Image (cartoon, rainbow, N blue to C red):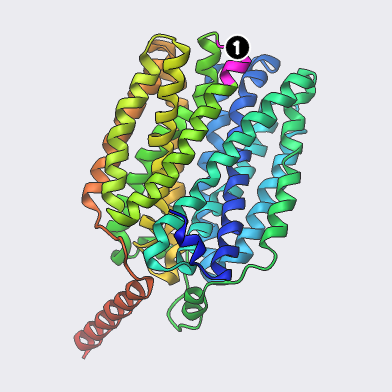
Amino acid sequence: MFDWYRSGSTEERKTFWACYAGWALESYDLQMFSFLMPSLMVLWTLTKQQAGMLGTVALLATALGGWIAGILADRYGRVRILMFTILWFTFFGVLAGFATSFNQMLVARTMQGFGFGGEWAVGAALMAEVVHPERRGRALGFVQSGFSLGWSAAVLVSTAIIAWLPPDWAWRVVFWVGVIPSCAVIFIRRNVKESASFTKAARNTAPQASLLSVFKPQYARSIMLASLLVIGLQAACYAILIWIPSLMVERGLAAGSMIVSILVMAVGAFFGFVSTAHFADTAGRRPALISLSVLAWVVTVCYMLVPVNPLLMQVLGFWVGFAAIGMFAALGPFLSELFPTRVRTTCMGFVYNVGKSIGATAIVGVGWLSAHTGLAHAIGLFCLAAYAISTFAMLMLPETRGVSLDDIDAQLDDATDNAQAAQTSAAG
């Protein structure tokens, strides 16, 4: 299972750790807010709808941030933009710790979201371009497993600080300590080089990526279907991740039991990432995503609706993490293989972050629906609808396992040349 790492070059390993660490840090910064929401709801007397808005706004901002970061990465390089995104969302995370009102927090979280948008797409593209095609699924899947580390750190750090410090200060300190891992990620990334694919594409005289690149006809079908895929997966995932702590509080679970439950889910996610990565490289991207979506349908609804039983909740929680979160291991290689190098991060940034932002409206939707159906039923209903959308998109997209990124670039060049020849002939 780890042969892809042992057989990789020094540059592949350095790139892996740079992408892994950055994704873990973003996951920490993004997920820790869900553990602060109960405290902020009490301190600032927020409604569930307001809390849902704070949870959603950073994700909505990722659409524009990811789109712009993708364009800049296609123009100026993946590594430079990855460094910038870390500095950006860390800075505004520190500012969020100084917020004194709902409106100030809303602005800080919005600005932080612009930085979140660039990390995944640019890092996934860089890793996809560096690693060998036969190992791409496993390499990107293990990068995705950094989410489990970040999520686990968010659980442990947030709950420890909230338990040790006064409520008025605890949530602020949680934001501020994010500076420490940020410095570590910047140190890890200091010597990472650009991929050969990007360097080659940068020498090409073709037009550079722009805001309009994602609307070009040759990418339209892939953009639309890939966006639907991400919308479905992210809607289900964030409905679970953001509202799980509140559901556990609603069910009367003690703080210790809550920590254990979420850590079990994070462990399940890690094993899901590893297993899905291997499955995606052996059976294909689509079979992996469709199989995990079906499994996620079943276990998520069971987890939300079964009577409170500590042992059963832990078992189901492991499988929720395994399926609903672990399936994202196949998403990175899948999306990176749909687009050519010159617009790869532009298209991936648009697809992933627009999908993520639209999917994030499920957070507000769950908050609204929970007032009528109860929180557990609201989460279950949103997950069922979301997985139906993503499964439809997967059935319409092509299988890409083992494809060479150079072949994708060559096909684009041929298509462009043919189109120009046709235009010249028509003009003549």
Q: Quadrant of residue 51?
A: top right
Few, some or many residues within 10 Å of mark 1 (<14, 14–19, 20+): few
Mainly helix, strand or loop, the magenta region?
helix
- In the orientation shown, which residue stands out farthest toward the bottom? 428
The answer to whether any part of residue 119 appears in the image is yes
- In the rendered image, the vertical position of residue 73 relative to residue 397, given as above or below: below
- Residue that badge 1 annotates: 254
- Quarter of the image for the C terminus: give it: bottom left
Q: Where's residue 90, x and y in %? A: 70, 46
Residue at x 76%, y 37% (from the top left corner): 176
Q: How many numbered circles are shown?
A: 1
> Is 5 positioned to the left or the right of 400 in the image?
right
Residue at x 49%, y 55% (from the top left corner): 121
Q: Which residues are magenta?
A: 253-258
Q: Where's residue 35, x and y in %? A: 61, 26
Pick whichever, 63 or 250, lies toward us: 250
- In the rendered image, the vertical position of residue 232 relative to residue 285, given as above or below: above
The kind of secondary structure element at disc 1 is loop
Residue 162 colored magenta? no
Residue 254 colored magenta? yes
Q: Where's residue 125, x and y in %? A: 47, 62
The answer to whether any part of residue 99 appears in the image is no
Residue at x 63%, y 18% (from the top left corner): 41
- In the rendered image, the vertical position of residue 406 relative to residue 124, given as above or below: below
- The amino acid marked with disc number 1 is Ala
